[in-house]
Amino acid sequence: MANIAEARIKREFKEVVKSEEVAKCHIKVELVNDTFTELRGEIAGPPDTPYEGGNFILEIKIPDTYPFNPPKVKFVTKIWHPNISSVTGAICLDILKDQWAAAMTLRTVLLSLQALLAAAEPDDPQDAVVAKQYKENPKIFQDTAKHWTHIFAGDSKVAMITHMLELKQIKKIAISHHS
Amino acid sequence: MSAAASSSQGGAEGGTHPPGEEDQGESSAYYECNICLDTAKDPVVSMCGHLFCWPCLHQWLETRPNRQMCPVCKAGIGKDKVVPIYGRGCTKSQDPREKLPPRPAGQRPEPENAGGVFPGFGFGDGGFHMSFGIGAFPFGMFASTFNLNDGRPGPPPPASPQHAEEQFLSKFFIWVAVLFIFWLLIA
């Protein structure tokens, strides 16, 4: 890994650890290996959204050309959101593509992702199915997103099982509504 | 939060009390490059006021040659739009970077002229040039470019068959021209 990338990640790592958001348990970054090329991020679902109460794990890969090119970020935790693939976790966010700027940091990326959870952009979707539902059936979208949060981003296994059952019902509703 | 507030106060007072360790950390952060997050080396500042190491900013500008923007605020930025910062203690560069182009030099605009209301807008001081022209410029250019008369054969001698041929052609074209003008007149 290029020198500048590693030196910067080390600095950013300290910055995130010291930041107030970490103190309030809103965001978190952990090392995966010692080379600083791969990190594990975590963001809390923002309040007053279907993601509230969930903790979402992110895979962050730092390219050699960082910070001149953006980090590669995707959701490991499954999430129901118009701009995030419900299958792969790939994220559609401009700052992770052409709108990246070298002064952005891990902290600002994680906060931007948290903001994305609070304000979806259904007109620039990553997951067309979710985006369609978001636009056409906001209520069902809310319920689905909330249940996905409980199932995949919650920390209680019991909640996971009970909500898995409820999800089946939601799916039935969704399918019947669709047909 | 309180540490940051106290340090900024200390800065405003002009450092009347000796800075503590945290104060030092905060004040050096003012001179951190926005790209490498280290204390800026060969510092330059953009028109929007953001500080960078010149090598860092240069690499950023090289990465996106089409969309040159400030890495912090996305304002327009360019090689000639940054100002180098020369501190007193850094007359010789510790790390000469041969691979990079040198940091852009500072610009020294002339001091403002107190007499003129609109300095630089007068017609007489060389700030304004205008020229009009209608002429045979392109034809003249073609003529001078292509008819340099070097290496071209001269006219054939009068008795040769080529001479007769050329005479015939020239007469023929004169007749064509006369017929054309005649047709123009009656049409």
Image: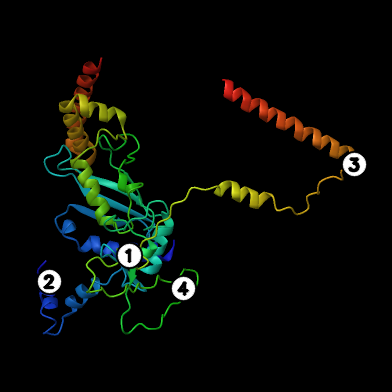
Residue annotated with mark 4: B97
Residue topped by disc 1: A10
Q: Are marks 1 and 4 in contact (CB under 8 Å)?
A: no
Q: Which residue shows up at 15% across the image and 27% down it?
A: A139
Q: Which of labels 1 and 4 is toward the front?
A: 4
Left or right of B35: which side holds B18?
left
- Let me know if marks 2 and 1 both belong to one chain: no
Of circles 3 and 1, the one toward us is 3
Residue depth check, mark 2 versus mark 1: number of the one nearer the observer: 2
Q: Tag 1's secondary structure?
A: helix
Residue under the point 90% across and 41% down: B159
Q: Which residue is mark 3?
A: B159
Judged left or right of residue A162, residue B145 is: right
Of the numbered discs 4 and 2, the one sitting upstream in the chain is 2
The image quarter containing residue A68 is bottom left
Determine the chain carrying the residue at label 1.
Answer: A
**Circles 2, 1 touching at the beta carbon (< 8 Å):** no
Secondary structure under the numbered disc 4 in the rendered image:
loop
Q: Is residue B110 left or right of residue B133?
A: left
Q: Which residue is mark 2?
A: B3
B87 versus A116 height, above or below:
below
User: In front here: B47 or A5?
Assistant: B47
Residue B163 percent coordinates (x, y): 85, 39
In front of the other: label 3 or label 2? Answer: 3
Q: Amino acid at mark 3?
A: Ala
